[in-house]
Amino acid sequence: MRQRGMCLIVITACLVVGAMIMVTGSGGYAASQAREISGASRQGLYVTVYNNGLALIKDRREIALDQGLNLLKFCDIAELIDPTSVHFKSLSAPGNCTLLEQNYEYDLINREKLLQNYIGKQVILNNDGITQEGTLLAFADGKITLEVNGKILIDPPGKIELPRLPSGLITKPTLVWHLKSKTAMKHLVEVTYLTRGLSWRADYVAGLDASDKFLDLTGWVSINNESGASYPDATVKLVAGDVNIVGERAVRAMAKAQPAGGTTQQFDEKGFFEYHMYTLNRPTTLNSNQLKQLELLTANRVPVKKLYLFEWSSDPRAGGVIGQKQVANARVFIQFTNAADSGLGMPLPAGRIRIYKSGDDGNLEFIGEDEIKHTAKDEKVTLYLGNAFDIVGERTITDYRKTGANSYEQACSIKLRNHKQEDIEVVVHERFYGDWTLTSPAAWKKIDSGTAEFRVKVPKGKEAEILYKVKVTQ
């Protein structure tokens, strides 16, 4: 196609096939002389994806080795491979062959490299089928300068045809091996390496019933493959946990996985080391530049509890001002337990949960979302959905005085107004800094070193009040 001000680089298929890629290795061999081991010889493929964008690839292929020194090109690998992580072994006869040397060839062809290699050399200018030979004088900022029949052409229209690939350039990342075999035989070999560009995350969708007492939960995993390779019919494992990647110890710990969980529809969950692994119980293909979604779990009628919460704080640095008011709407949470008797019980990987609820017309409406951390079996999941429109809290400092350089006494009134058409329970957290003693006519409990918790029943359309006094020493 002819475009003004633009040259297209054309290398015909026959020239590409015939090109010699002369990347010289030790022993006088060149990469072009190596025998190619492509993905077509693959006998098994295993992909383990971690939360932090790292993946472990285990690739098993059948290769035929001659007696003595063999030069092989191991192709169809991830473009973002960490070549220092490659591990090679023969599963057929480990003592029969030895890997003497490995070279990672990654000087990939692109337009700029091709043209830079042809500066000062003969090329062909093809303009609507009319071809002329010329010398490429310069290539900079995407513009081409040619000398054709004694004339200087700057960025001429047409296509530039190159007679052959320059030596030393390759079309895809390749591992070049020097292998020594004691005998001529076929080997099933396993190549393991780490690569970037593969990641996964969990997403959950929950439907809350009309009573706000049960939800249906579905979990999905999304696997994003930007590693520069495809993984056909692979056994896929997902690891949830914070794996340290500075060293190799945490990654290698997965070899000692022990069963520690149940089975979902598509994934088998196992615990290993300090992490959790989810294995897809059927092969799947992870294509390059693909986002694949797979169902992780389904649970129906999971019991939930709705929570209305106010959290107030007494900051001694600010000092107390008698009559000072704070007004806010209650924060709304729902809470469930990740337990077998709730229809769950599998460790939940971190991810986003979106909550929906059916409206009066039967259609689902979005009511909020939250993130969960990695959640172990039998732990509680608490989700913040938003603020309650009809539940209002008003906190007033009714008395305050300093009792020393680092101590004070304070009295507060907290009014809770329920404008809903149903009775509710409201939870109030009051936070203090230092040693504190609280007295109140309302029931309360100390839930940690700095928090007092009140639970108050508020009838529909009514107001309830909490009164307390506190002595605080810093």
Image (cartoon, rainbow, N blue to C red):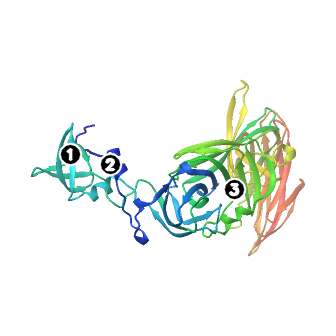
What is the total number of numbered labels drawn onto the structure image? 3
Asked if residue 106 can be seen in this view, the reply is no
Q: Quadrant of the C terminus?
A: bottom right
What numbered label is drawn on residue 102?
Answer: none
Label 3's element?
Answer: strand
Q: Position of residue 224 (x, y in %)?
A: 57, 48
**Pointer 1: residues within 10 angstroms few (<14), some, or many (20+)?**
many
Q: In which image quadrant can residue 255 be found? A: bottom right
* Front-lying residue, 331 or 145: 145
Q: Nearer the viewer, mark 3 or mark 2?
A: 2
Q: Nearer the viewer, mark 1 or mark 3?
A: 1
Q: Position of residue 108 (x, y in %)?
A: 40, 57
Name the amino acid type tagged 3: Ala
Label 3 belongs to which residue? 240
Q: CA distance from mark 3 to mark 2?
A: 48 Å
Identify the residue at horizontal 33%, vertical 60% (top origin): 167
Name the amino acid type tagged 2: Leu
Lower sequence index among marks 3 and 2: 2
Label 2's element?
Answer: helix
* Front-lying residue, 103 or 292: 103
Label 2 belongs to which residue? 15
Q: Position of residue 136 (x, y in %)?
A: 20, 54
Label 1's element?
Answer: strand
What numbered label is drawn on residue 125?
Answer: 1
Q: Quadrant of the N terminus?
A: top left
